[in-house]
Structure formats: structure tokens, C-alpha cells
Image (cartoon, helix red, strand yellow):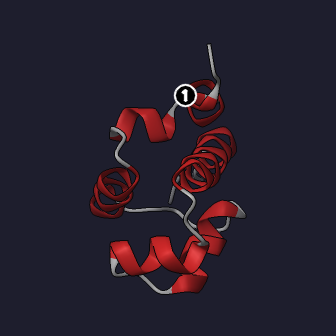
Amino acid sequence: MPRAPSPSLRAALAGNVRAFRKQHGYSQEQLADLCELHRTYIGSVEREERNVSLSTLEVLAEALEVSVPELLTQGAGRERGKVS
């Protein structure tokens, strides 16, 4: 039986992709272009509709200049964006 993806992990990824994208000043379309993905794909990741592959995680992390673990850590995008 196929296993259902973790909603909390998808939520963490969605929030972090959105936060890191905004920190860089990228639109969804600009990020998609950097990653060589379709613009609607980025939106579906940010809406928690996608189960992202490991290779796509790597591409997103590289484009956003973060690590894959940071993309999957709840609140990492918000924490990194804070000014001390």
C-alpha cells in the first residue's frame, strides 16, 4: 500500500520555499526559471499540493542558496529572514 506523504513536511517545505523566495526578491516565475521548472509547479509546491522529488529539492535549495535540510525544517525561512 502506498504511504501518504507527511502534511507537516509539505507545509514546512511550502513555507520555506515561499519565505526564501521572497527573501531573494524572486517571483514564482523567476524561481521557476532558475530551477528550469514550470511556473505553476512552484505555486503548487507553495500550496502544499506537490510531493517533491529529491532531485527537485536539490535544485530548489541551490537556487535559493540554502541546504535541503533547511528547506525541510519548520520555520527555517522565517528564522533566516530575521534581522538581529
Can you see residue 27?
yes
Asked whether the viewer can see residue 74, the reply is no
SS under mark 1:
helix
Going by the numbered disc 1, the residue's amino acid type is Arg
| Apparent side of residue 44 relative to residue 70 in the rendered image (left or right) | right
Q: Could you tell me which residue is drawn at 58 percent across and 67 percent down? A: 50
Query: Does residue 35 appear left or right of residue 55 in this picture?
Result: right
5 vs 25, nearest the viewer: 25
Q: Residue at x 59, y 44 (%)?
A: 16
Per the image, the residue denoted by label 1 is 80
Residue 15 image point, x, y percent = 67, 46
Is the C terminus in the top left, top right, bottom left or bottom right quadrant?
A: top right
Give the percent coordinates (x, y) of residue 35. 35, 72
Residue furthest to the right:
47
Give above or below for 79 relative to 63.
Answer: above
Residue at left offset 63%, top offset 46%: 19
Q: In this view, does 53 lie above or below 9?
A: below
Residue 34 occupies which quadrant of the picture? Answer: bottom left
Percent coordinates x, y for residue 54 in the rendering: 31, 55
